[in-house]
Amino acid sequence: MIFNLLLVFGIGDSFGMSLKVRLYDTLTRKKVVLDPNVVRAYFCGPTVYDEPHLGHARAYVVFDVLVRLLKYLGYKVIYVRNVTDVDDKIINKAKSEGVSPFEIADRYYREFYDAMKALKVIPPNLEPRATGHIPEIIEFIEGLFAKGYAYETPDGVYFRVRKFKAYGKLSKRSIDKMRAGARVEPSPYKEDPLDFALWKKAKPGEPSWPSPWGDGRPGWHIECSAMVLKHLGETIDIHGGGEDLIFPHHENEIAQSEALTGKPLAKIWFHVGLLIVRGEKMAKSLKNFVTIKEALQKYDAESVRLFLLSANYRKQLEFSWDRLKQAEDILDELYRALFLAEYRSKEAVGAKNFKSAYEELDRHDVGLEERITSFRRRFLEALADDLNLVEAINILKSIARYIIQNVNHLSREDLISLARLLRELGGILGILQESLQERIEEKRKRGKPIGSFIPPNYILNESELIGKLIQLVIDVRKELRKRKIYDLSDTIRKRLRELGIVLEDIGLETRFYFSS
């Protein structure tokens, strides 16, 4: 793919360090300039207990665009995304099915992996699992004990929330007014209802590992802090996730990490707005979800991506099948311009036509190179300004409109340049990377019409088209015979034979075959 080559060869480097990327930081409620060179990024990954749905997909696709942008601009990105493969939800699912929790985790990790691949999400540099970091988690908790932030009870180890004076700074909640989050279990042994589990002592039939506090397993929040520390260091550049993770998950990560290290956990907290259905969060518990697999049965991956990117990433996005259809229509219009430019640029033109084309270009658009540079600069500036996806998509639409309106006045070289621009910029969003034939097959696979983006005079399938044309001629000839216009009927038969197509009349039916 063109975009992948751009990343490999660093084509975007000239735009990189001179263009300041600013991202909205949930902690400070301000846009923060991202430091150049190496970006260490951590994004909270899936809890693998069920099929991933479109609500999950939005967060991963948005962060995927951010990573693509940074790489395009010349940043070196070290991207870590964890997998929670031991958790209450996984254990409960395993009990309900009568299988091992590890079987559930492996099954649904595969579902997640396949879904991300289908959505063209670039894999992270590292994808560590909670169960692969038990020693690091235990060491982390021991450090919290040494500093007085952790205490042991009969059912586990807990973090003293009130000892961490800055608790609530991310979610902007008052510690005296907040309640423990839904994923923080109640316990009669806690010193304070807000304290959260660092280590859960083993219950019969649950997976467990040995520790200084007895056999057990890590709490939900501690795994991320331990993995960030091991793979990225004490302070990272970007920590991200869905906005539903702000409290309690990310609030608790901040508390335990900064209590241990005494340093800020992240320079920028990046949160993606929720996908909602009729005003409610898309969620398994509400049974209002659409799985990624279901969506991809009706729409291709690029259409789904474009829908998920169609609003300000920090705001909630309302899901409906109509909105997915609108995204598909927009994508088809972009592909219409792209394929028109690519197809027309391949048409053979003589010197006279070239001269005419350049004369028309001079009259209609002085300096196409400057126009292309402007399109690229505006697109990148939009994304660099807190990932302004709406404006970036609008600029792609402007490029497409320009191609369609001026295609008859542009030279072959100009059409090639504009087509490359669409693919180059579209690649940062993870769209406009398919060939015409791939796009046709995507449509046919779902039984959808393909005429909207096919260039004029393009032959879809030569053998299929020839067969249909011959059948049309046979039908016309049949009507001529029916009307007893035999001289014209015989002429058609003779001319077809001259072309190597033999007609054989059998009663009222006519068959054809090709002569050798």
Image (cartoon, grey):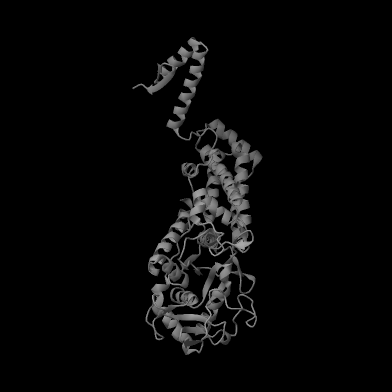
* Vertical position of residue 151 compared to residue 297: above or below: below
Left or right: where 77 falls relative to 393:
left
Using the rendered image of the protein, determine whether residue 374 is visible from the camera's viewpoint.
no
Q: Which residue is drawn at 60% across and 82% down?
A: 166
Using the rendered image of the protein, determine whether residue 194 is visible from the camera's viewpoint.
yes
Q: Which residue is drawn at 40% across and 22% down?
A: 512
User: Whole-percent x and y of residue 504?
Assistant: 39, 18
User: Whole-percent x and y of residue 305?
Assistant: 54, 54
Is 4 or 13 nearer to us in this picture?
A: 4
* Vertical position of residue 456 compared to residue 157: above or below: above
Is 27 or 232 nearer to us in this picture?
A: 27
Place residue 244 in its image quadrant.
bottom right
Q: Which residue is drawn at 57% across and 61% down?
A: 282
Is 92 or 1 nearer to us in this picture?
A: 92
User: Whole-percent x and y of residue 476?
Assistant: 51, 19
Left or right: where 137 falls relative to 454:
left
* Vertical position of residue 237 compared to residue 163: above or below: above
Q: How many labels sit on residues?
A: 0
User: Whole-percent x and y of residue 287?
Assistant: 55, 61
Image quadrant containing the C terminus: top left
Is 482 or 79 nearer to us in this picture?
A: 482
Left or right: where 463 falls relative to 182:
left
Residue furthest to the left? 516
